Image (cartoon, rainbow, N blue to C red):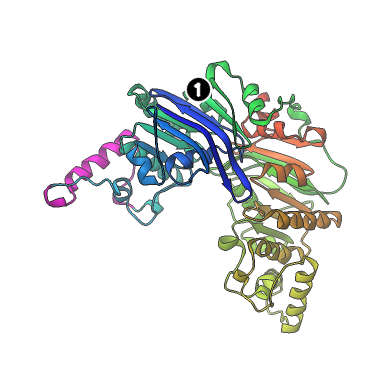
Amino acid sequence: MLEMRAIDKRFDAVVALKGARLNSSPGEIRALLGSNGSGKSTMIKVLAGLVAPNGGLILLDGKRAAIHSGVDSRKLGIATAFQDLSLIPTMSVTENILLGNEPLRAGGFVDKKKARQTIRELLDRFHIDCDPEAYVQTLTPSTQTMLEVAKAVSLNPRMLLLDEVTAALHYDEIQVLFQILRELKAQGLAIVYVTHRMKEVFEICDTATIMRSGETVIDAPVPELTLDDIVYYMTGQRPEVAASASEMDVAQEGETVVDVRDLEVYPKVWGISLKAYKGEIVGIGGLQGQGQPEFIRALLGAEKVATGSIDFCGRKLSLKSPADAVRMEIGFVSGERGREAMFPLRTVQENITAGKVAKGNVGEYMTPKSLRAFANQAVDKYNIKIGELRDPASSLSGGNQQKLVIARWIAMNPVLLLLDDPTRGVDVHSRREIHKILRQCTDEGMTVIISSSDNEELLDISDRIYVFYEGSVSDVLSGEGKTADRLVAAMMGMGAANQKGGDQ
């Protein structure tokens, strides 16, 4: 039915796809697999009409198909449900699902009765309990994801593309989705299923296409593959034998700065235990949505801890807000610069000195001269390219904006610096400079905990890596065991803790 041949795609100097291929047949659920950056999401976007390939051929029923837009894709009978939802938050459930596909009656008016019936049947089929007139932004993430899939299915496509849709779903919702996929498969639908959850591949998929570095490595029936085979084709290396769970967190010499025990933050973090030592960079890896942001923010006091304990410098940590964390000499850098880290319309100086002001005692007066000197020192020390201190922070490049945010906290010399995907969207040169800054800080005794979506970054900068899977620690990598293949295996739930059937 569908055949993609020799698909090439470049984003400036970055090669996303290099001669990639994908086949899909009616009545088949095909897994599209690959580690981060392998090109699988780009392949989906090409089929969805969101990305134009630089070369290659797409055939549908043996005839060349031209897909230049989302409209072209839908006209060919292709529907897509994305992990990054395509729903419009400020519109209702009904409006989102029927947008561009409203049932009409004579005169071109919307048939409201038929629209209500269509929506109710769809919500019942997907077991979605919500008001059809509710705004999407008021619904839980899992409900929004089910609506995303329901919207795609409502188009009655001949091919359904699902891109990491189970990442935000609960177990019972996944089982409902799988039952619907089995029904669609029996009706002759072709389904391409992108996931990092290997259990789902073996439960629901018939065949698999595995990609690595923008190329298609293999097509194979799922029953002929093992977990080790999948990791091998994704990384080019056979997974190493994981250390036993009792060996996963070997004590390091030096002072313990952070000691987390059995931490739970509902509904994402379940029984996490972690240690970080003075002068160490601890990495947190894992696929998107495995509890990393919630864990980092629990250490910051921005997420409510349900159970468990956090010891900081030998004392139990009990934070009511991030302001408490700042006073305890804990800094935080977010990869979401515009939303969580930076004040775009404020000046460079105000952005750099914001942390110092927040940490200061109530009633303490800081002279303009002292604040200016503080900002100048940070700009010079961390090589931030600016015009003037009075220029808005939004005038800087992305890399310099992030260095500005990092400089804000490092200049305050915190005991612990927490970073949540800090180099996302940052150019390679700025990333290297940020890594150099962080390593200098740990050499001077600071402790760093960094969560990153980039595996190479974690392997490059971390002394040890805790890998999260489904809200728990799948493995802890250090020394010679800190390898790309073992990291990928742990991200898929194949780490030491999972193999032993328990947490660390």
Q: Nearer the viewer, residue 244 or 157?
A: 157
The quarter of the picture where the N terminus appears is top left
How many marks on residues?
1
Instruction: From the top left corner, tell me how far across and down residue 201 is, in percent.
Output: 52, 26
Residue 151 seen by the camera? no
267 lies left or right of 322: left
Q: Residue at x 74, y 24 (%)?
A: 241
Instruction: From the top left corner, tell me how far across and down residue 296 is, in percent.
Output: 65, 50
Residue extending farthest to the right is 253
The quarter of the picture where the C terminus appears is top right
Q: Quadrant of residue 328?
A: bottom right
Q: Which residue is mark 1?
A: 207
Q: Kindly identify the amino acid type of the residue bearing the numbered disc 1.
A: Thr
Q: Nearer the viewer, residue 310 or 88?
A: 88
Instruction: From the top left corner, tell me how far across and down residue 212 is, in percent.
Output: 62, 33
User: Where does the magenta region start and end?
Assistant: 106-134
Relative height, residue 101 to residue 158 (above, below): below
Q: Residues within 10 Å of mark 1 (few under 14, many from 20)?
A: many
Q: Is 112 within the magenta?
A: yes
Q: Is 115 within the magenta?
A: yes
Secondary structure beneath disc 1?
strand
Q: Quadrant of residue 379?
A: bottom right
Q: Residue at x 39, y 46 (%)?
A: 70
Instruction: From the top left corner, tell me how far across and down residue 69 is, in percent.
Output: 40, 47
49 lies left or right of 498: left
Residue 239 seen by the camera? yes
Q: Residue at x 71, y 31 (%)?
A: 486
Relative height, residue 23 to residue 77 (above, below): above
377 lies left or right of 389: right
Residue extending farthest to the left is 106
